[in-house]
């Protein structure tokens, strides 16, 4: 099936680790990558592996701990687990050119009765590949 929309971007990275120093009060640290999935990070604080989601989260490149790491120099180690990150951009209706979605571009069975307006005519259904 053909792909409709902006092409996905693939960014390749070398394996990277970052170190931070805990303050005993600060819970947020800025990552060098725009990560929004805590599962793509291995986080170790004071030699103890932390659990993604329970101990920390990552959103828009900000690592947030549920409890502030203790005061110590370089006691927080972040290892990025993903060497390739694929990002997809959503296509908005305004980005679609008039007539760009044709009957041949629709997957078989994708236009069903429940997706048609109650005021649709036979011509409307026929033009969009129904029946």
Image (cartoon, rainbow, N blue to C red):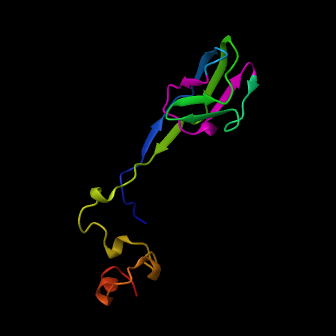
> Which residue in the rendered view is the most extreme toward the top?
73
> Which residue in the rendered view is the most extreme toward the right?
48
Residue 114 falls within the magenta-colored stretch: no
| Residue 74 to residue 27: above or below | above
| Residue 9 to residue 15: above or below | below
In the image, the segment drawn in magenta is: 27-47
> Which residue in the rendered view is the most extreme toward the front?
25
Instruction: Give the camera-side residue of 19 and 70.
Output: 70
> Which residue in the rendered view is the most extreme toward the left?
98
Residue appearing at x 24%, y 62% in the figure: 97
Picture quadrant of residue 112: bottom left
Residue appearing at x 67%, y 30% in the figure: 66
Picture quadrant of residue 27: top right
Picture quadrant of residue 107: bottom left
Instruction: Give the camera-side residue of 65 and 1.
Output: 65
Q: Is residue 89 left or right of residue 124?
A: right
| Residue 104 to residue 47: above or below | below
Instruction: Give the camera-side residue of 14 and 99.
Output: 99
| Residue 127 to residue 31: above or below | below
Residue appearing at x 61%, y 37% in the figure: 38
Q: Is residue 131 left or right of residue 100?
A: right
Residue 127, percent across and down? 30, 82
Residue 65, percent across and down? 64, 28
Residue 44, percent across and down? 70, 24
């Amino acid at each position: 099936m053909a792909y409709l929309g902006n092409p996905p971007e693939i960014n390749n990275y070398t394996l990277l680790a970052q170190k931070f120093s805990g303050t005993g009060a600060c819970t947020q640290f800025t990552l060098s990558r725009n990560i929004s999935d805590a599962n793509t990070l291995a986080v170790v604080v004071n030699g103890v592996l932390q659990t993604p989601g329970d101990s920390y989260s990552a959103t828009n490149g900000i690592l947030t701990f549920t409890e502030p790491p203790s005061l110590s120099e370089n006691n927080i180690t972040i290892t990025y687990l993903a060497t390739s990150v694929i990002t997809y951009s959503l296509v908005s209706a305004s980005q679609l050119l008039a007539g760009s979605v044709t009957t041949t571009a629709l997957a078989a069975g994708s236009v069903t009765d429940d997706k048609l307006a109650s005021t649709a005519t036979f011509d409307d259904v026929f033009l969009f590949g129904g029946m």
